[in-house]
Amino acid sequence: MTTTPESQTGTSSSRPSSTPVHAFTGIGDHNQLNPLFARVGESTDFPLNTLPPGETLPETAYQVVHDESMLDGNARLNLATFVGTWMDDYATKLYAESLDKNMIDKDEYPQTAAIETRCWKMLAGLWNAPDPENALGTSTIGSSEACMLGGLSLKRRWQKARRAEGKPTDKPNLILSSAVQVCWEKFCNYWDVEARYVPISLEHKVLDGHDLENYVDENTIGVVGIMGVTYTGMYEPIAEISAALDRIQEKSGWDVKIHVDGASGGMIAPFLQPELHWDFRVDRVVSISTSAHKYGLVYPGLGWVIWRTAADLDPDLVFDVTYLGGHMPTFALNFSRPGAQVLLQYYLFLRLGWDGYYRVQKACQDVALYLSGEIAKIDAFELWNDGGDIPVFAWQLRKGYTDKWNLYHLSERLRLKGWLIPAYPMPDDLAGLVVQRIVVRNGLSRNLAESLVLDIRDAVEYLDRLEAPMPTEGLVSTFTH
Ligand SMILES: Cc1ncc(COP(=O)(O)O)c(C=O)c1O
């Protein structure tokens, strides 16, 4: 064996021209000659922003990528994200078996396509569609795409009605809470729709139908109701929003529909608040979206959107493709995307059923209520909500408690212990108010939550003991949607 460590990176810049690229043949030899972490590429460096000129041994490349990803936060201690970070071993096995499936290749993967249909029909039933067989749905890459499709459908419905009446269609608007997730701002920006934000306030912590008549007009394509506001986790009362729209219709004749953004709550409310009317039981709700990768409990990369009936989605938006000898309607922004997550969703539907989902979501909520209860006991804090809707809650620093530190400092202190708990300002009219939020997901056990409470108490005691105020320069919001 004549190889040198340099030759094993395969990079033309480091390889002596006399050494053949394939001189190295055996991993055993290679390990002898090149101890891990002492190889070129690891003991030196890779170019960061330019494509390396040559090849690298897979073990070396793997180790470098693996090591860099270690610098990311610990997923289980990430209480900032709503997105799933844990699935069981069978799901992981299934995932590995189906990594290569492309959701758009419905003729190549007809069974995955059939399973996708089964999944959205199950959801249509869960969300009380009048006839789940006559609903229409699709998987998406997440809630953002699902919301865009819901919004596009509202816009097209409004345009058609206006054109039929010979009226202009150049000024569509959409009514949203000011605490809406950024995907709706994107929707309005990308598809030229005016976003009309109803500001949340201390009196109206969510969009609740109050003052709606001052926002809705003949150009309103719809109202978005959020089940699980991103900032705080609170539900918007869909039935009350609908009742306000009924009153507006009585006066004006405008029949304004609702899209429910159930990114998180769409997979919580059916289990924890089954009596709450937020879904297709409310007649004005024409479409509902959710993130399967949030409380649907699937790894990142899956969402769902469902229309009450096939007639609620304009057929012009649907591309009809013929597979399986039949017709397969598709409505999506993406073409290729992973199919594995759809199988994971189906696995969970079979594995957990209603009872299993109930148990998982209830366990999360118990932990959220425990945590919010403990945080409420700490003098420094005031709760914004308690996690009784989705298992997410936010709190603020009690007015006048201290001028030495704020919630950004607390967030930083907790990060030293590995906890990722963001602090951020509330939207618009409440932008002066900074809150901190915890998202409880499957995997944050009661035991871990108790450790968290101790760490929060320790951090507060440390900050309270400071003799001078913490510097505030350069503090940034660590808010993640
Ligand atoms: C209410 C709401 N809508 C939409 C989204 C976007 O979801 P996704 O990340 O699945 O695109 C989020 C994400 O947190 C959300 O909270």
Image (spheres, grey):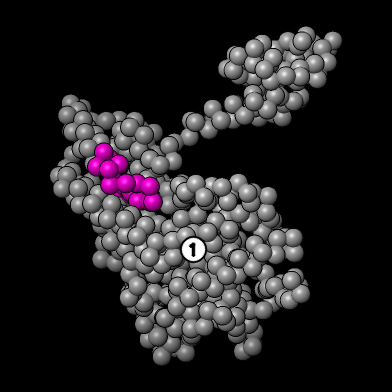
Image-quadrant location for residue 478: top left
| Quadrant of the frame with the N terminus | top right
Q: Is residue 65 magenta?
A: no
| Residue 224 in picture, x, y percent from top left | 46, 70
Q: Is residue 232 above or below residue 242?
A: above
Residue range corresponding to the magenta coloring: 434-452
Front residue of 479 and 74: 74
Residue at the image position 71 percent from the left and 24 percent from the top: 56
Image side of residue 276 versus residue 377, left or right = right
Q: Is residue 470 above or below residue 271?
A: above
Q: Is residue 209 above or below residue 404?
A: below
Q: Is residue 308 visible?
A: yes
Quickly name the residue at label 1: 349
Residue at the image position 15 percent from the left and 44 percent from the top: 379
Residue at the image position 65 percent from the left and 30 percent from the top: 49
Question: Type of residue at label 1?
Answer: Phe
Image side of residue 117 versus residue 398, left or right = right
| Residue 353 in picture, x, y percent from top left | 44, 65
